[in-house]
Amino acid sequence: MSYDNLSGRTAVVTGAASGIGEAVAVRLAAEGARVALLARRADRLETVAAKIRAAGGEALAVVADVTDDASVQAAADAVHGALGTVDLVVNNAGVMLPHPVDDGRLDEWQRMIDTNVTGVLRAFTGDLVTVAARGGTADLVNISSIGAHLVFPTYAVYGATKAAVTQLSQALRAEFGPRDVRVTNIEPGLTETELADHIGSDEGRAQVDGMLAAMGSLSAADLADLVGYVTSRPRHVNLSQVVALPTRQA
Ligand code: NDP
């Protein structure tokens, strides 16, 4: 399906160097949006941006660490300078670092909290309110997880960060909805990306491989299609909460 009315939109996608964020950036650009790609790996961002341009789209690669305020502010300045006011933000950057609670990995818990929760960008909310006030369509899309609701051993802090994102999305919707800014919280199930590559233990990796074998997975492109769908609805329609699971995932 094609989402014609995304043409002319100006989007920011965090975590666009790989996985879901990359697919979302590629898809929004293919639908005619101008897209700023944010993540830490410059080489990967440039590769994705080049792919978008080769297909006739418009892309800007901006190195940014969403856990670092100065970095986020510099990225916002770069985006505003090159593309102007943003009307579609996809907060997708995230890390998943499972550990048994009694391992006490405060460093990795903090990294998940800083990336997955604090990293939900505030830099562009002013843009969204401005666009909506002048009659445009404005979207804030947060990528949470079905892990916001499910309980898995070793995933206590990851699940807590995603529960926080889901709650935050509802709170943001209460603040921004009355100002005509749509807020959409997407909770994907198992999706084939690089996310599990950062798991430090063989045991943790085997657990994910077992789930993939048993349940199958969504592709990043499936999630990109969903983001295209929700952001291309008529301005007065806000799909506020979407759970997207592989069919066999309970
Ligand atoms: P990936 O690991 O492929 O993508 C994560 C992206 O986040 C990368 O582009 C990475 O780029 C970026 N990122 C990580 N840390 C930072 C940071 N500090 N600043 C900026 N960018 C950062 O995994 P996914 O595509 O799966 O993950 C995307 C989102 O989807 C995450 O929020 C994840 O929790 C969520 N999700 C994924 C599911 C799955 O099964 N895959 C299921 C449910 C939710 P770089 O390293 O270059 O910064």
Image: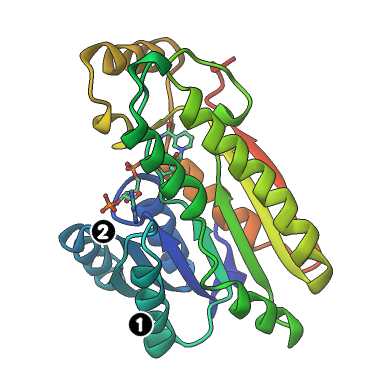
Q: Using the image, determine if residue 7 lies above or below residue 250.
A: below
Rendered residue at 39%/14% (across/down)? 102
Label 1 CA crowd tier, 10 Å (few <14, some 14–19, many 20+): some
Quarter residue 74 falls in = bottom left
Q: Using the image, determine if residue 28 lies above or below residue 113.
A: below
Label 2 CA crowd tier, 10 Å (few <14, some 14–19, many 20+): some
Rendered residue at 41%/51% (across/down)? 93
Rendered residue at 55%/41% (across/down)? 144
Rendered residue at 66%/53% (across/down)? 184
Q: Say whether residue 102 is left or right of residue 149.
A: left
Among the two numbered marks 2 and 1 on one chain, the one whose residue lies closer to the N terminus:
2
The percent position of residue 91, horizontal first and vertical second, equals 50, 56
Is the CB of mark 1 within 8 Å of ligand 1?
Answer: no
Tag 2 residue: 40
Disc 2 residue type (three-letter): Arg
The percent position of residue 41, horizontal first and vertical second, equals 21, 58
Quadrant of the image where one finds ligand 1: top left
The percent position of residue 250, horizontal first and vertical second, equals 59, 14
The percent position of residue 9, horizontal first and vertical second, equals 54, 76
Alpha carbons under labels 2 and 1: distance apart:
15 Å
Disc 1 residue type (three-letter): Ala
Residue, far left: 43
Q: Using the image, determine if residue 214 lies above or below residue 146.
A: above
Tag 1 residue: 78
| Residue 56 in sight from this viewpoint | no
The kind of secondary structure element at disc 2 is: loop
The kind of secondary structure element at disc 1 is: helix
| Residue 61 in sight from this viewpoint | yes
Is the CB of mark 2 within 8 Å of ligand 1?
Answer: yes
